[in-house]
Structure formats: C-alpha cells, structure tokens
Amino acid sequence: MDLKLEGQKALVCGASRGLGFACAQALLTEGADCCIASSSEEHIREAADRLAEVTGRLPTWAVADLTQAGDREALFRKAEQSLGQIDILLANAGGPPPGPFESHPAEHWQLAIDLALGMVTHLCGLVLPGMRKRQHGRIVQIVSIAGLEAIDGLILSNASRPAVLGFAHALAREVGNDGVLVNSICPGIFLTDRIRELGRERSKRQGISLEQYLDNLGGDIPLGRPGDPKEVGDLASFLASPRNSYMTGAALVIDGGKTRRLL
C-alpha cells in the first residue's frame, strides 16, 4: 500500500534509538522528510547516519531536552526552518525511571510530568497553528500500555500516561474539523534499550541474570515474543499518513495480546 507520505514533513522526537528511531525509519522509507531529535548530540548524529544508511535518505537533526520549554521551542523553530512546515508530529520521549512509589523523590514525579504531559502539550501548541491553517496534520504520540493498566514497578508511568491519553482524545475532538488527526500508540514489550534498562532493575530483584529476564519476556505474551520496534514504526507511519483519513482520538494497543484489560 502506498501511504502517500512522499513529501510530507515530519518532526520525530526521541529518535536516536528504540521506538522513535523505528518510527523515523518507517517515515523516511515511505518518502517523508524528517527532522529527528534527541537530547544527545552524539546519539542523534549517529542515528541520522544510520537512518541514511538503511533508508538512503538523510534526515536533518536537532538536539533538544524535551523536559525544557526553551529546548522545545528551539526544536520547533529548527524543524520548521529545515522542513519548511510540519505536517506530522511524532511525539516520543521515553519513560520515567522505574521503581515502586517509595523509591521516587519529588524530582522524579516532576520529570514524569514533564516527559509526558508537558512535552506533548507544548509541542502540539507549537505545531497546531500551521496544521490548522493548512487544514491538514497528523499528531501521533507514543505512550505505553502503562497508560491503560497498572504495571508493577512503573508507578510513575501509571500516574502520568493516562493524562496524556486523555489529552490526546480531547484534542482530537477539538481539531478534527481542521483536518488534524490525533492518535496514541500504546506499545507493550519491545526489545529496546528502555526494556533492557527495566530488565536490569527487575532481574536484580528476581535474582536472575539480565539474559534470563529477557528470555522470559515472551512468557506472558500470547504471541510468545516481545515486539520488534519496526512493528511500531509501521503502525505510526500509517497513522501519520494521508491514508489514515478517519481514525482519530484512538489509543491503539500493540502488544502481542499481553494487555488483560477488557475496555
């Protein structure tokens, strides 16, 4: 299927690795022009080179700490300058630290809010005027199944992610008549650096090696395996494309069947 992304302009956040990198790869492969961002200049430069190698198309890149309002504004200006306009916002910023409630100082709670709600609401506020003026835009945010059900050891995500889903659903209703579609992706377990970080903490608690922990990840997944980040990239590229013309306000779960919620 031709997703009709040729010439579309995308700002992809948190793109130096993991799910953000996979989304940038999918968008570039489908013909979109991308500006990718990360908080590390070294990592985002390396990501741009790797994306050029695997897709044949070199993205522009920017350095931004998405917890900082000034960095978000600078990122928007650079992306708009390099791309000409922003048709697609792929909002992704990773997750807050894992651990139970009593392990988190106050600054961790503020970080969780800044990474989730602060990041996406500010960036949406920056890109929406242009999208509404052109009567076309796609906003896709990477969230987590932790926004839909309680997961042991992820209390910061369980507290902050539902707010992001609520925001996206409400925003979709406000901007639908302007041709702007807003959707959320809720990934389960994917073999990313983030999962390995969680694995190090959990494997210590369980008294097993990290390798054993990763091998056990597929046990509670009906499909029997963790996901490949490229599978999220494929979903994101469809949601961001003109081919998606009627899906908005949705929170799409992609988890191999792991989530047990009924609604």
Image (tube, rainbow, N blue to C red):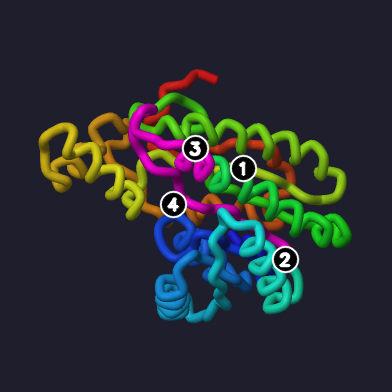
Which badge, 4 or 2, comes first in the chain's sequence? 2
User: Which tag, 1 or 3, sits closer to the chain's start?
Assistant: 3
| Residue type indicated by callout 1 | Leu
Q: Type of residue at label 2? A: Ile
Q: Residues within 10 Å of mark 4 (few under 14, many from 20)?
A: some
**First-in-chain label (2 vs 3):** 2
The answer to whether mark 3 and mark 4 are in CB contact below 8 A is no
Q: Look at label 4 and name its amino acid.
A: Glu
Of circles 2 and 3, the one toward us is 3
Q: Residue at point 45% right, 60% down?
A: 22
Disc assigned to residue 109: 3
Of 203 and 52, which appears nearest the observer?
203
Residue 59, image quadrant:
bottom right
Q: How many numbered callouts?
A: 4
Q: Give coordinates of residue 233: x percent, y percent.
A: 49, 56
Of helix, strand and loop, which one carries label 3? Answer: helix
In this rendering, would 15 be left or right of 205? right
Residue bearing mark 4? 231
Q: Position of residue 146 (x, y in %)?
A: 46, 33
- Identify whether 73 is placed above or below 67: below
Q: Which mark is residue 86?
A: 2
Give the crowd class for mark 2: few <14, some 14-19, many >=20 residues within 10 Å. Answer: many
Disc 1 secondary structure class: helix
Residue at numbered disc 1: 117
Q: The magenta stretch spans which residues?
A: 87-112
Closer to the camera: disc 1 or disc 3? 3
- Mark 1 vs mark 4, CA separation in Å: 25 Å
**CA gap, disc 1 and disc 3:** 12 Å
Q: Residue furthest front?
A: 106
Please state which amino acid type lies under the numbered disc 3: Trp
